[in-house]
Amino acid sequence: MVKKELISNDNSKGYIPDYSGVSSFNAKGFLDGKRPTFDLKKALSIIKNDPVVKGALVTLVDKVLESGWRITGKDKRSRIKALEDKLGKIRFNKVLKKLVFNLILYNNAFVEVVKKGEELTDLNVLENTLMEIETKDNGDIVSYSQDVLTKPTWKPEKILHVKLHEITNNVWAEPLDMEALYETTLIKDYIRQYLMWFFGTTQKRGVFAF
């Protein structure tokens, strides 16, 4: 009878870095396991790397668009030839798909409205995680910008900011669905790592091997 070597690591200890990697201090000393601040970029990275979650999001966006949509002109008519031609030129179907994806994922979407004179020439969905909003003390928006090297800036009238669910007066709609999805994906990823450790190190064979 040979005694089996038990392998211990972070996976076997039930270690989830996102929860256990932060320590807080109070009168009783250091406490481990405090939930870290929600990081939108980190959450997006985790969700993008999960094929099941990513596939579900793409399917949801497709189903939303399949349910139908229409654009109504100033005279309340949607079947206007000039309007349909313009939407075709600016690839509105692709813009709309990106818009819905951002709304579902972030609860916010930012669209740059590009004009030549008074004529609309393009619509660009901007990267949500790079956006910054400058406001006055009363909440009025001064400008939109992106946190990149060139720091592009837009006046409020040049950006269409759409919020899916707005439960506060904050200029940013809280990404509530994203946070819930992040929590679920973290747990799913932990279970996957634990099972890989459990079966990969033959822990299922018990303490002793014959």
Image (cartoon, helix red, strand yellow):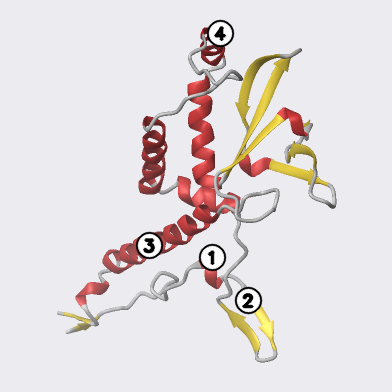
Residue 152 x %, y %: 77, 32
Tell me the crowding category of disc 3: few under 14, some 14 to 19, or many 20 or more residues within 10 angstroms, Cα based: some
Q: Earlier in the sequence, mark 4 or mark 2?
A: 2
Tell me the crowding category of disc 1: few under 14, some 14 to 19, or many 20 or more residues within 10 angstroms, Cα based: some
Query: For the residue marked with disc 2, what is the amino acid?
Result: Ser
Q: Earlier in the sequence, mark 2 or mark 1?
A: 1
Q: Earlier in the sequence, mark 2 or mark 3?
A: 2
Residue under pointer 3? 193
Q: Earlier in the sequence, mark 1 or mark 4?
A: 1
Above or below, comparing residue 195 to residue 23 in the picture: above
Residue under pointer 1? 18
The answer to whether residue 5 of the structure is visible from this angle is yes
Residue 175 x %, y %: 57, 52
Tell me the crowding category of disc 4: few under 14, some 14 to 19, or many 20 or more residues within 10 angstroms, Cα based: few
Element type at mark 2: strand
Residue that protrudes farthest toward the left in the picture: 210
Residue that protrudes farthest toward the right in the picture: 137
Element type at mark 3: helix
Q: Nearer the viewer, mark 4 or mark 3?
A: 4
Q: Are marks 4 and 2 in contact (CB under 8 Å)?
A: no
The residues bearing labels 2 and 3 have C-alpha atoms spaced at a distance of 23 Å
The residues bearing labels 4 and 3 have C-alpha atoms spaced at a distance of 55 Å
- Closer to the camera in the image, 134 or 147: 134
Residue under pointer 4? 82
The answer to whether residue 150 of the structure is visible from this angle is no
Residue that protrudes farthest toward the bottom in the picture: 28
Query: For the residue marked with disc 3, what is the amino acid?
Result: Gln
Residue 26 x %, y %: 69, 86
Query: For the residue marked with disc 1, what is the amino acid?
Result: Asp
The residues bearing labels 1 and 3 have C-alpha atoms spaced at a distance of 14 Å
Q: Nearer the viewer, mark 4 or mark 2?
A: 4
Residue 30 x %, y %: 64, 84
